[in-house]
Image (cartoon, coloured by chain):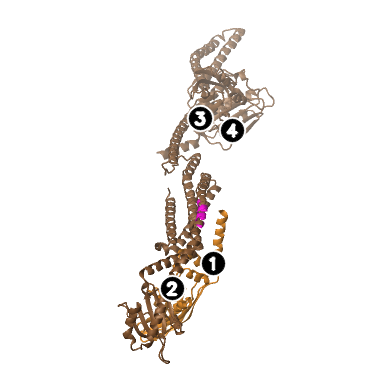
Chain colours: A brown, B orange
């Protein structure tokens, strides 16, 4: 229970107790209780204030409940139903009791007043009066006789005679006075009281008028006594008129009976007079009790309903918090009943859910970390990795897979493999190989050769299937592939180099003796032979010498191809080198048309300019050779900076309008002795490729897609640029 | 039964309405004066009581009436409030003695009773204040001005509890005079 709720509860109980006590006190006050009689008005006021306070309490509770109902606060409807039910259960019997109590009240009070009883009381009073009247008549007659006797007693003798007269008539007090009330003499039986009780003015006036007075005196010693006042007849005119007053006691028994009759009569008369007021008062108290009971019951109903609804409201709030994801909510357990058990169970449930959620979150975080780790590993992996689901849809692919396949693989995530083929047709062979019997194959390994825009590409693929869980739906297929084109090519180049070196060594050595022998033979026998024979000898030896020279050139070329690179890299502007080579060709052949598109923002690269000059020479020569049989030739040389797949490089493109390259050899065009020309050693493009690879670049030939002819494409990495070197140098300095 | 109950309730309400709308009782102070007799100041006053028939009926039915007479004397000051130098309440109880058919007037302060044959006589005696001692002349400042106040009222709180709620709202029972003031000489 909250502090305010406890305060309201204690205040309500206190108010209830005080009002109950007040009502009891009021009821006692109405029944002539001297203890509470003086508090009656205050109690009435207090109860009225208490009822007003209860009304305010109920009104506040009603407003609060109405507000909760409007806001659709959980538990409010149940509270309303409970208030109505409890109020009805308590008010109905109270109203029935009130109804019958009112009836009993009216009947009961009316039954107090019986006509016969009232008549009996009136009669008893009258009887008392009559009984006293007889005594008073005797006393009056006796007093008048005594007054006659006093006629002859002078005022001077009165004090001496008065005691005898008092004793003779049996009076308590006997007084002789003038008609004006002046005391002449007095005698009393009470030794402690010497002052006589004078007659009242009205009595004196009556006696002065000549009438005797006799009546009951109620105030002397709180006992009844009979007061008689009579005139003393005057003998002579002019003599002062006198009166006699005598007080006669009433017997104790008569006194007691008269007092009882008087008391009962007065009490009955008072009650009879107060009959309607009593009814109103009792009805008022009964109504106050009714209102008090109803208000208390209604307030208790409000209080009980709110207390019962509070845990349900808390539970609803807790449930709402859980739906909003707050599992830390703990509800206060303030009761030991079933609702308290329910709240405790709810708290236990939220704790368990919270723990489970934390465990799930932790495992999710771990999974995400693992996923991030795997992504990082896959991202840095040089091999291409593709993950397919059981429907052969691409689920995951790393960066290298896109680079190797020259495709935007990330855009194909979630799409089936045939769509990949549709977008990148050159991957058909790869996809076909991967898809074939994927379900039935276990671990597999296969070398696949592709023919893409960049030429032949050899991929070494391996794959396996993984089960992420026991469910079949969770089965995935992992395909890992490496581009081994360069490796295969390297091996082939190495083999060619070795062969060239051996050829150069084995062939070059006998060539010189052959040449020398042929020259000597001609020199020795040419002059000794006849003319026709000499001519033949001369022609044959010349042929031998020329062929030897040719073979020497060939051997030298082989030696050039085979010799280890001795590069001298330096920072250079590639555009300057290109312009220089192009200018040379323009000078040699003024008919040649060379279109230049060199990017102006190219940074310097670090490379061997002599070796690159040889590259451009070979490529331009090849291009012109390719266009030698055409009348309208067009050669275009361009350079630009390219940013693809996150790597910057410089691309140089030499584009001719020749017949192009046959698809059968475009993949092997850079291999030695692969050529479309009738002349040449077949090593020009092989040397170009060798030099470019020495500089860390790549070169390939491709047929033009928009026109006839082919293009030689060179890409030189920017990693060797001056700018990058400076940056690396600065970074190294900062680290140190 | 229901008819009887409704009738009784209507009757009670009618009684209440009649009680509220009836003529009022009145109490007025006709005069009040003080005189220096020897070394003491004495007050003489006459208060006239005209009780409503309802009050007299209650008296005739044995309901005792308590009447209070308040006497105050204040010393006048120019700048501060007037201090009360004398504050006295005279309480009387008037009742009817059924057996003797007389009226008894009891001085509750002195516990003295007087018996009157007629009510007028008793009310005159009740309203007559003769030679009532106020204070000794030696106890007051001869140069200061003293003003006496007197009023009287019927004490409703002394009525039987059932009568009080009605008496509080009924003008018949609102017997209270206004304050009468005089210069104490």
- Quickly name the residue at label 3: A608
Give the mark toward the camera: 1 or 2: 2
Task: Say whether residue A103 is magenta.
Answer: yes
Percent of width and height locating residue B48: 49, 78
Query: In the image as oriented, which residue stretches furthest toward the right?
Result: A631
Given contact means CB atoms under 8 Å apart, are the residues at marks 1 and 4 in contact?
Answer: no
Viewer-side label of 2, 3: 2
CA–CA distance between discs 2 and 3?
166 Å
Q: Which mark is residue A133?
A: 2
Alpha-carbon span between mark 2 and mark 4? 158 Å
The foreground one among A447 and A691 is A447
For marks 1 and 4, give the one nearer the viewer: 1
Residue carrying label 4: A639
The magenta stretch is A97-106
Q: Quadrant of residue A179?
A: bottom left
Viewer-side residue, A565 vs A225: A225
User: In the structure shown, which secondary structural element does the residue marked by tag 4 occupy?
Assistant: strand
Q: Residue furthest left?
A: A191
């Amino acid at each position: 229970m909250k502090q305010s709720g406890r305060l309201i509860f204690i205040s309500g109980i206190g108010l209830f107790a005080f009002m109950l006590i007040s009502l009891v006190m009021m009821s006692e006050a109405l029944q002539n209780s001297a203890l509470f009689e003086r508090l009656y008005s205050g109690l009435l006021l207090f109860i009225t204030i208490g009822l007003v306070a209860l009304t305010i309490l109920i009104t506040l509770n009603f407003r609060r409940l109405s507000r909760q109902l409007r806001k659709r606060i959980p538990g409010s409807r149940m509270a309303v139903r409970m208030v109505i039910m409890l109020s009805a259960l308590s008010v109905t019997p109270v109203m029935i009791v009130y109804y019958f109590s009112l009836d009993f009240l009216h009947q009961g009070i009316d039954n107090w007043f019986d006509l016969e009883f009232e008549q009996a009381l009136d009669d008893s009073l009258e009887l008392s009066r009559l009984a006293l009247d007889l005594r008073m008549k005797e006393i009056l007659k006796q007093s008048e006789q005594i007054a006659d006797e006093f006629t002859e007693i002078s005022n001077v003798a009165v004090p001496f005679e008065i005691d005898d007269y008092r004793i003779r008539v049996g009076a308590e007090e006997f007084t002789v006075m003038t008609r004006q009330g002046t005391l002449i003499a007095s005698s009393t039986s009470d030794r402690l009281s010497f002052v006589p009780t004078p007659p009242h003015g009205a009595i004196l006036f009556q006696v002065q008028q000549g009438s005797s007075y006799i009546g009951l005196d109620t105030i002397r010693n709180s006992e009844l006594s009979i007061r008689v006042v009579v005139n003393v007849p005057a003998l002579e005119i002019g003599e002062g008129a006198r009166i006699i007053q005598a007080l006669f006691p009433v017997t104790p028994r008569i006194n007691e009976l008269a007092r009882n009759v008087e008391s009962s009569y007065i009490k009955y008369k008072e009650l009879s007079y107060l009959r309607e007021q009593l009814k109103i008062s009792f009805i008022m108290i009964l109504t106050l009790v009714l209102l008090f009971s109803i208000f208390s019951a209604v307030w208790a109903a409000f209080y009980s309903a709110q207390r019962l609804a509070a845990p349900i409201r808390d539970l609803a709030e807790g449930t709402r918090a859980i739906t909003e994801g707050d599992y830390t909510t703990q509800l206060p357990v303030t009761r030991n009943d079933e609702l308290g058990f329910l709240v405790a169970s709810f708290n236990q449930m939220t704790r368990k859910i919270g723990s489970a959620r934390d465990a799930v979150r932790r495992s999710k975080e771990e999974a995400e970390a693992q996923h991030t780790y795997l992504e990082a590993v896959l991202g840095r992996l040089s091999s291409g990795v593709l993950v397919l689901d059981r429907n052969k849809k691409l689920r995951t692919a790393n960066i290298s897979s896109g680079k190797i396949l020259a495709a935007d693989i990330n855009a194909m995530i979630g799409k089936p493999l045939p769509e990949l083929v549709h977008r990148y047709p050159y991957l058909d062979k790869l996809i076909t190989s991967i898809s074939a019997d994927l379900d039935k194959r276990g671990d597999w390994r296969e070398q696949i050769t592709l023919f893409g825009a960049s030429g032949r590409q050899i991929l070494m693929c391996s794959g396996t299937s993984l089960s992420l869980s026991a469910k079949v739906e969770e089965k995935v297929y992992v395909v890992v592939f490496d581009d081994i084109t360069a490796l295969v090519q390297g091996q082939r180049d190495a083999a060619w180099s070795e062969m060239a070196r051996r050829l150069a060594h084995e062939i070059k050595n006998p060539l010189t003796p052959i040449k020398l022998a042929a020259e000597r033979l001609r020199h020795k026998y040419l002059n000794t032979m006849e003319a026709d024979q000499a001519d033949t000898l001369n022609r044959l030896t010349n042929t031998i010498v020329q062929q030897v020279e040719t073979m020497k050139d060939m051997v030298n070329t082989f030696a050039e191809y085979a010799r280890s690179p001795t590069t001298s890299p330096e920072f250079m502007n590639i555009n300057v080198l290109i312009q220089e080579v192009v200018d040379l060709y323009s000078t040699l052949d003024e008919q040649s048309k060379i279109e230049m598109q060199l990017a102006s923002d190219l940074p310097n690269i670090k490379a061997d300019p002599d070796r690159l000059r040889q590259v451009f020479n070979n490529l331009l020569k090849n291009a012109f050779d390719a266009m030698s049989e055409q009348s309208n030739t067009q050669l275009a040389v361009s350079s630009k900076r390219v940013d693809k797949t996150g790597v910057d490089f410089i691309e140089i493109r030499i584009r001719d309008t020749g017949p192009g390259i046959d698809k059968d050899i475009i993949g092997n065009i850079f291999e030695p002795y692969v050529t479309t020309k009738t002349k040449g050693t077949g090593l020009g493009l092989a040397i170009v490729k060798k030099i470019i690879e020495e500089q860390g670049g790549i070169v390939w030939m491709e047929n033009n897609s928009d026109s006839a002819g082919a293009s030689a494409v060179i890409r030189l990495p920017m990693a060797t640029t001056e700018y990058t070197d400076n940056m690396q140098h600065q970074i190294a300095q900062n680290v140190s | 039964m229901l008819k009887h109950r409704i009738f009784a309730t209507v009757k009670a309400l009618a009684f209440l309405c009649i009680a509220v709308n009836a003529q009022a009782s009145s109490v007025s102070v006709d005069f009040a004066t003080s005189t220096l007799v020897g070394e003491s100041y004495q007050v003489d006053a006459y208060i006239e009581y005209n009780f409503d028939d309802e009050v007299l009926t209650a008296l005739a039915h044995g309901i005792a009436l308590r009447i209070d007479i308040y006497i105050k004397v204040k010393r006048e000051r120019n700048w501060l409030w007037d201090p009360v130098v004398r504050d006295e309440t005279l309480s009387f109880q008037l009742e009817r003695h059924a057996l003797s058919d007389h009226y008894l007037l009891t001085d509750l302060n002195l516990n003295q009773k007087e018996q009157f044959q007629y009510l007028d006589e008793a009310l005159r005696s009740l309203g007559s204040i003769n030679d009532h001692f106020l204070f000794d002349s030696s106890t007051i400042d001869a140069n200061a001005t003293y003003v006496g106040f007197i009023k009287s009222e019927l004490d409703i709180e002394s009525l039987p509890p059932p009568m009080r709620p009605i008496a509080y709202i009924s003008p018949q029972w609102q017997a209270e005079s206004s304050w009468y003031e005089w210069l104490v000489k």
